[in-house]
Amino acid sequence: MQRIRTENWHSTPEGEQRGYIDPFQLKELWFHTGTACNLQCPFCLEGSGPGDKRLELVRFADVKPYIDEAMELGVEQFSFTGGEPFLAKQLVQILGYAAERKPCLVLTNGTEAIQQRMDEVVTLLAAPNPVSFRVSIDKPTAQEHDSGRGEGNFDKALRGLKKLHDAGFNVSVARHMDKDENRPEIERQYQLLFEHYGLPVDLNMVAFPDFATPGSLPQVPQVTTACMTTYQTEESRKDFMCAFSKMVVKKNGQMRVYACTLVDDDEEYDLGSTLAQSLEERISMKHHRCYSCFAYGASCSEG
């Protein structure tokens, strides 16, 4: 069923037709495990923190039907984000069920929440499909990282990353990206850091721009249909996350499907209660975070 959208969904304030993406498959399904987190970072794109309930913690019974439906739709990977996913008590059970079917990726801050559950986590090594972990290391120095995450969390995150790697899991790193950064130099600093902690120097890193906090409205250029046809091709548009992925969240006790991992603060991106329904909808690029995808090729996926 087609949802009713406001005019803002279709047109910019200047009256131009907004850019859009037409979904073409369900390659990756994301689950938001909830906005509760053991840390409270001022820059968090989810506004997560201890006890936060903007998005509720999920349980196995919430997630299982979507894993099953995704399999029917040809999904290739399941991914999990938060908040801090390991505050969801049934996360390991959820991951075990998902990894029996497809590879999984978990985004984590790498600190106490996951480290205190390592005895459970290592059981996932026996799953038929790999479970990989991406740990947030915002900056390559403790001073910069801990200024947002809290004192001591740089070392905790790196030790968590090391524990996961040494246990035999595939690991990667999420970092912050500055607009005018010297990327080769930044990556060299991370390589030295990884070497210091006994990690492979060639760990995959995924860099993210500042997405701003939930509900904020930073001034960014509007992405119009002309932008998407002048600077993008039909093939390149398939690389946008909303073309091949969806995210499931729990709000007000209900499981809902959203267009991607970055837009759960705007209810116009609520695509319904089923994955099949969500794949029928054209996605407007009206959210300010859509500009980051357009300008930087931002993607929450690996690679």
Image (spheres, grey):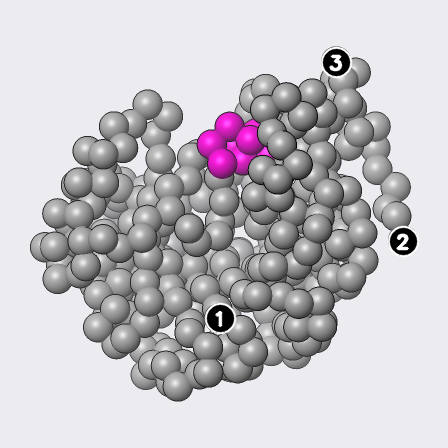
Residue 119 located within the stretch drawn in magenta = no
Q: Is residue 238 above or below residue 244?
A: above
Left or right of 280 on screen, residue 247 = left
- Would you name the residue on which mark 1 appears? 103
User: Are discs 3 and 2 less than 8 Å apart at CB?
Assistant: no
Q: Is residue 297 visible?
A: yes
| Three-letter amino acid code of the residue under disc 3 | Glu
Task: Give neighbour class at mark 2: few <14, some 14-19, many 20+ (Cα, 10 Å).
Answer: few
Q: CA distance from mark 3 to mark 1?
A: 44 Å
Residue 292 located within the stretch drawn in magenta = yes
Element assignment for label 1: loop
Task: Give neighbour class at mark 1: few <14, some 14-19, many 20+ (Cα, 10 Å).
Answer: some
Q: Position of residue 300 (x, y in %)?
A: 49, 49
Q: Is residue 267 above or below residue 70?
A: above
Residue depicted at x 40% and y 81%: 124
Q: Position of residue 199 (x, y in %)?
A: 17, 60
Question: Which label number is shown at residue 1?
Answer: 2
Q: Quarter of the image holding residue 111?
A: bottom left
- Which badge, 2 or 1, comes first in the chain's sequence? 2
Q: CA distance from mark 3 to mark 2?
A: 29 Å
Q: Is residue 31 visible?
A: no
- Which badge, 3 or 1, comes first in the chain's sequence? 3
| Three-letter amino acid code of the residue under disc 1 | Pro
Residue depicted at x 53% and y 73%: 102
Q: CA distance from mark 2 to mark 1?
A: 31 Å
Q: Tell me the magenta residue range.
A: 286-297
- Would you name the residue on which mark 3 appears? 14
